[in-house]
Image: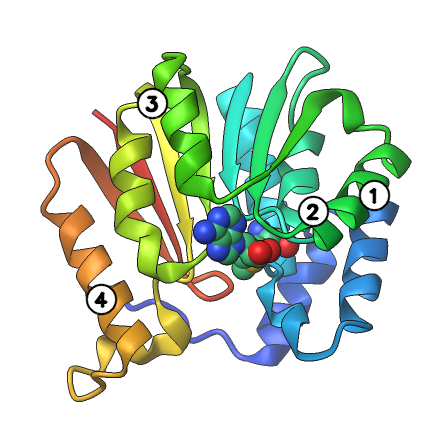
Amino acid sequence: MGKDLEINEEIEKYIQELSKTLHPVQSEIISYNKTLGDIMRMQISVSQCVLLEFITKVSKAKKILEIGTFTGLSTLSMSLGMSEEGLIITVDKNKETNIKAKNFFKKAKQNKKIQTIVKPALETLEELKSKNSIFDIAFIDADKDNYKNYYENIVSMVRVGGLIIVDNVLWHGEVADSNNNKKFTKIIREFNNYVKNDNRTEQIIIPLGDGLMICRKL
Ligand SMILES: C[S@@+](CC[C@H](N)C(=O)[O-])C[C@H]1O[C@@H](n2cnc3c(N)ncnc32)[C@H](O)[C@@H]1O
C-alpha cells in the first residue's frame, strides 16, 4: 500500500519555495502577527493561505462566509482568489483585531469584496439564516467549543456542491491519541466524528497547518 510522505521542515520549506509567492500584504499581516506574541499562533499557516486562495479560485466561489477573521490573513487569502464581483462576509467578536484586518484589506485593495461583522458568530449566523443567505464556501476558524454549532448552522446555508472548510481538526496531532482526553482534544475529536457520520456532506482531512477538514455539501 502506498504510504504518505512524512513532511519534515526541509520538505515543508521546499514546498513553500515552489508554491505561489504570498501577496505583500499577506506577508505584512504575518509580520504584524509576530509582534503580537503567542497569539500569532491563531493565524492560518502559509500552506493553508496558498490552498485557500487556490480552492477559492478553482471553485469560482462568489460568496464566502468566514467565522474567525482575527487580523485578516485567511480572509485576504480567499479574497485574492475571488473575482471582483465576489463577496466575503467575515465575522469576529474582537473589535481591535477587526480594525487591523480592515486596514490590511484596504491596503491590498480587497476591501470592496470584504464585509466584516463584529459580533458573536452565533448571532450573525442566526441573522444570515433568517435572510436565507446561501454561500459557496464557509470557513470555520474560531472558538472550538462552538464548532458543532457553527457547522450545524452553516450546513443549511451552503449550496449543494459548496464547501465547508474547518481549521484545527488535528489539534496538534492530539486527536489521534485515544489516551489524550484534554478538554479541547475531546471537543475536536467529537466534532470530527460528528461530521464523519453526517450524510449531508462528504469530507477529507488534509494535514496542512493544524489540520484542515474540507466538507463538500451533497
Ligand atoms: C484562530 S483565530 C482566526 C484566525 C484567522 N482565520 C487567520 O487566519 O488569521 C480565531 C478568531 O475567532 C474569534 N472568536 C472566538 N470566539 C468567537 C465567537 N464566539 N464569535 C466570533 N468570533 C470569535 C477570535 O476573536 C479570533 O480572532
Q: Quadrant of the C terminus?
A: top left
Residue 96 or residue 74, whichever sits in front: 96
Q: Which amino acid does label 3 sit on?
A: Met
Task: Tell me which numbered mark, 4 or 2, is placed earlier along the sequence.
Answer: 2
Q: How many labels does the image show?
A: 4
Where is mark 2, residue-wise? Answer: 72
* Mark-to-mark CA distance, 4 and 3: 24 Å
Residue 27 picture location, percent across and down = 82, 55
Where is mark 3, residue-wise? Answer: 157
Q: How crowded is mark 3: few (under 14 residues within 10 Å), some or many (20 or more)?
A: many
Q: Toward which corner of the image does residue 135 lie, by quadrant?
A: top left
Using the image, tell me which numbered label, if any, was put on residue 104. Answer: 1
Q: Residue at x 48, y 44 (%)?
A: 120
Q: What residue type is labelled 1?
A: Phe
Q: Are marks 4 and 2 in contact (CB under 8 Å)?
A: no
Where is mark 4, residue-wise? Answer: 189
Task: Tell me which numbered mark, 4 or 3, is placed earlier along the sequence.
Answer: 3
Q: Residue at x 42, y 24 (%)?
A: 127
Task: Tell me which numbered mark, 2 or 1, is placed earlier along the sequence.
Answer: 2
Q: Do the residues labelled 3 and 1 touch (CB within 8 Å)?
A: no
Q: Residue at x 90, y 37 (%)?
A: 107
Q: Is residue 35 left or right of residue 186?
A: right
Does ligand 1 reach within 8 Å of label 1's beta carbon?
Answer: no
Residue 70 picture location, percent across and down = 64, 53
